[in-house]
Image (tube, rainbow, N blue to C red):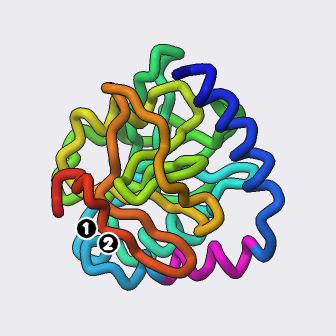
Amino acid sequence: MQELKSELRKNAREKREKISDKETKNANIAESLFNLEMYKNAKKVLIYVSLRNEIETYEIITNALNLGKKVAVPYCKDSNGNMDFYLINSLTQLETGSFNVREPKTDECEMLSDFSDSFLIVPGMMFDEQGFRLGYGKGYYDRFLSRFNSISAGLCYDEMLVDSVPRDEYDKSVDIIITQSRIIKCSNGGRHG
């Protein structure tokens, strides 16, 4: 299974690099997200900080902050897949951390412990319509999703949506997937139908 996922990750990286007009597609994905009632109603937005060829999240972070939502970004605590989320008030509270990812400055930011009324945005290289994803193989989000009870969403280019992502017992699905052309309520359901 791990070998298959590794090969898929390599292919997905190459495919995602070649996607054209990412700026427009990112804007369409963000616009669809902003119009979602569950996003509008969320008091807290938990979101990854994008890098390289990922769907860009800086505009989403700025939008959530401007709407007065609490915004929390992940901080990788260790190499065993454990992470915490810290509240940020501004993009200036980010610094380069684990895996060259921009992370919160933990000495300036407060750790979030209450995840009620939250909307979690999960990164992934590819997704299937059941809400399962091919992540980066470290298990951080699957561990977090196993104890997260609010709404989770995956951002995905149409080009990276596949029929089925290989999964094992630890893989967790998201509730909805937002692409540049549609919103998919995952049949696997996550937890919110």
Is residue 93 visible from the viewing direction of this image? no
179 horizontally vs 96: left or right: left
Rounded to the nearest angstrom, the CA distance separating label 2 from label 1 is 5 Å
Secondary structure under the numbered disc 2 in the rendered image: helix
Which residue: 37% across, 33% down? 171
Q: Nearer the viewer, residue 179 or 87?
A: 179
Q: Residue furthest front?
A: 163
Is residue 179 visible from the viewing direction of this image? yes
Amino acid type, callout 2 = Tyr
Magenta part of the protein: which range?
A: 22-31
Number of other residues with Cα within 10 Å of mark 2, as a class: few under 14, some 14 to 19, many 20 or more: many
Q: Which residue is mark 1?
A: 42
Disc marking residue 83 = none
Q: Are marks 2 and 1 in contact (CB under 8 Å)?
A: yes
**In the image, residue 79 above or below residue 192:** above
The rendered magenta stretch, by its main secondary structure, is classed as helix
**In the image, residue 54 above or below residue 106:** below
169 horizontally vs 135: left or right: left
Number of other residues with Cα within 10 Å of mark 1, as a class: few under 14, some 14 to 19, many 20 or more: some
- Across the whole image, how many numbered discs are drawn on residues? 2
39 horizontally vs 12: left or right: left
Q: Which residue is mark 2?
A: 39
Which residue: 42% across, 70% down? 64
Which residue: 42% across, 56% down? 121
Residue 58 covered by magenta stretch: no
* Residue 12 x %, y %: 69, 46
* Residue 191 x %, y %: 17, 52
* Residue 36 x %, y %: 33, 79
Q: Nearer the viewer, residue 9 or 21?
A: 9
In the picture, the quarter occupied by the C terminus is bottom left
Which residue: 52% across, 22% down? 1
Amino acid type, callout 1 = Ala
